[in-house]
């Protein structure tokens, strides 16, 4: 049995000729509902009978606000699309441990974009969408096409301050996100607070605060 981990569930938005992720998104959801009409008749007994009538769907994205992520959509981007009444094409993709893919793809309208701020805490956002029209089921991966952007997802064992990922040596690192919080990528010196030191030659990523057990992280990158 190949399970789907939460870190392998993504919501991608088609924009400017390719698929993009939302900057610093920590969770996403989709909800498909079926309305019904009662078909009970007089004398049919105490149990009501129903028939399916209409299908509809909604979705949401939640995370931490980041205003400058190359190749990604930010709160400012999506709020501008909301104000312009722009209809978005999105795909909600799941990948299991064996590499099997199942996506739902369809058009939607942004119905709500909420963000807030609390002193000494990262500022969160929530985007709500209303689907319009049919959802299409797709069983092949949806590539991140813009700027050849790729995403590396993993979960820490716990206690690490350095992650060794040789396959990411000599890459253009666009974003390093630890438990939903974006870190500033540096290539020299020692990392402090929300910084990550990237060793171009080895693919090592060093942070100041050790990872907690099971803490998720992902890295967006493209080839140099």
Image (cartoon, rainbow, N blue to C red):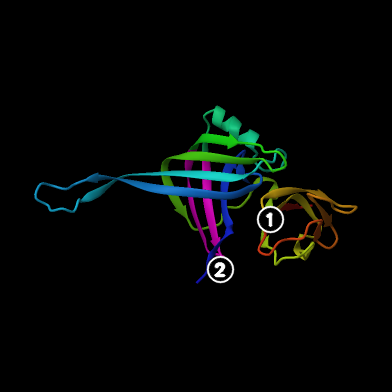
Badge 2: few (under 14), some or many (20 or more) residues near its Cα, within 10 Å? Answer: few
In the rendered structure, which segment of residues is drawn in magenta? 89-108
In front of the other: 211 or 151? 211
**Residue drawn at x 55%, y 39% as measured from the top left:** 127
**Residue drawn at x 67%, y 38% as measured from the top left:** 118
Q: Residue furthest right?
A: 189
- Residue at disc 2, secondary structure: loop
Q: Is residue 105 magenta?
A: yes
Q: Is residue 137 left or right of residue 148?
A: left
Q: CA distance from mark 2 to mark 1?
A: 19 Å
Does residue 158 lie above or below 54 as drawn? below
- First in sequence, mark 2 or 1: give its number: 2
**Residue drawn at x 52%, y 66% as measured from the top left:** 3
Q: Which residue is mark 1?
A: 218
The kind of secondary structure the magenta stretch mainly shows is: strand
Instruction: Point out residue 160 in the picture as x, y percentages from the top left corner.
Output: 77, 64
Judged by depth in the image, the label closer to the viewer, 2 or 1, is 1
Q: Is residue 190 magenta?
A: no
Q: Is residue 165 left or right of residue 2?
A: right
**Residue drawn at x 18%, y 47% as measured from the top left:** 39
Q: Which residue is mark 2?
A: 98
Instruction: Point out residue 5 in the picture as x, y percentages from the top left corner.
Output: 57, 62
């Amino acid at each position: 049995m190949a399970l789907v981990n939460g870190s392998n569930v993504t919501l991608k938005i088609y924009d400017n000729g390719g698929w993009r992720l939302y900057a610093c998104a920590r969770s996403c959801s989709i909800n498909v509902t079926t309305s019904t009409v009662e078909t009970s008749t007089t004398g049919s007994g105490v149990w009501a009978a129903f028939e399916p009538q209409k299908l509809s769907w909604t979705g949401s994205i939640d995370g931490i606000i980041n205003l400058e992520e190359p190749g990604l959509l930010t709160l400012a981007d999506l709020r501008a699309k909301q104000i312009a009444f722009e209809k978005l094409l999105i795909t909600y993709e799941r990948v299991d441990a064996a590499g099997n893919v199942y996506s739902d793809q369809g058009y939607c309208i942004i119905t709500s974009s909420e963000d807030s701020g609390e002193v000494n805490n990262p500022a969160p956002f929530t985007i709500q969408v209303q689907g319009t029209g049919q959802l299409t089921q797709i069983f092949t991966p949806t590539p991140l096409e813009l700027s050849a952007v790729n995403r590396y997802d993993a979960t820490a064992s716990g206690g690490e301050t350095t992650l060794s990922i040789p396959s990411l040596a000599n890459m253009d690192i666009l974003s390093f996100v630890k438990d939903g919080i974006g870190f500033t990528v540096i290539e020299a010196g020692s990392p402090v607070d929300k910084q990550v030191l990237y060793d171009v030659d080895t693919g090592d990523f060093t942070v100041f605060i050790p990872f907690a057990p099971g803490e998720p992280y992902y890295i967006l990158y493209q080839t140099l």
